[in-house]
Amino acid sequence: MDFLYRHRVALGFFCLMLAVAVTFGICFFALARTAAEPLRMTVVIDAGHGGVDGGVAGTRTKTQESDINLAVARILQRHFEEAGFYVVQTRPTEAGLYGVATPGYKRRDMEKRAEVILSSSAAAVISVHQNFFHETSRRGAQVFFRESSAGGKALAERIQTSLNEMPECVKRTQALAGDYFILNCSETPSVIVECGFLSNADDEALLLDDGYREKLCAAILRGTLSFLAAGANSA
């Protein structure tokens, strides 16, 4: 009996130590994995319009702004992910974010975008749009920021500089302050990138070209990286 009792106690102790070792090993592995895979910085990409809200349309091809916005946003996502970022898309499909297209759908759409932005803990928000103007000679990319946001202004200026350096840029412009919902809905540095004028035939042709879209997104990424690097260096 004494032998059996000691045997059971020893076996129980062994099982307890094994359980502790396994638990410790799992915890150690999880910690090691976390250390080896640091949290990635998040960027929100907002493809403007969508669903019944097509935005403006190309003068020559009648291509909807919403379709171009989504195509550019998807390329942007790939560029940022390849650079190591975690990307959140407010509008990942052709559909709008308003639910049913009943009165007030535009407000509901914008509020949903704000929800995504506010829950993302992002380092930056980039809203993709296309411009339109009654003077068809106007062309080129233009970046907007909220006037009271120092971070938004700095981000816009860095991206605008990068866009101005593209070979296709025919006229260098400055980032401009603008009073828009997507810029006002959070304290995250946020910009609207009007990629070009669909009212201009040359800009329209560029914006429908896959090669140009790639270069455009690469320029936006470079500007964003420049902004984030400047912030890190000043911290």
Image: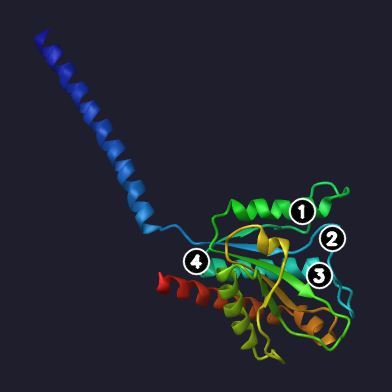
**Residue at mark 2 to residue at mark 3: CA–CA distance:** 9 Å
Front of the two marks 2 and 4: 2
Considering every residue shown, the one lying at the far front of the view is: 148
Under mark 1, the amino acid is: Asp
Of mark 4 and mark 1, the one earlier in the sequence is 4
Tell which of 56 and 12 is nearer to you.
56
Q: Are marks 2 and 4 in contact (CB under 8 Å)?
A: no
Q: Quadrant of the C terminus?
A: bottom left
Front of the two marks 4 and 1: 1
Q: Is residue 225 visible?
A: yes
- Give the labeled residue for mark 3: 65
Please tell me whether mark 4 sits on a helix, a strand or a loop.
loop
Of mark 2 and mark 1, the one earlier in the sequence is 2
- Give the labeled residue for mark 1: 109
Under mark 2, the amino acid is: Asp
- Give the labeled residue for mark 2: 53
> Residue 87, position in %: x, y?
58, 61
Q: Is residue 125 above or below residue 201?
A: above
Tell which of 190 and 13 is nearer to you.
190
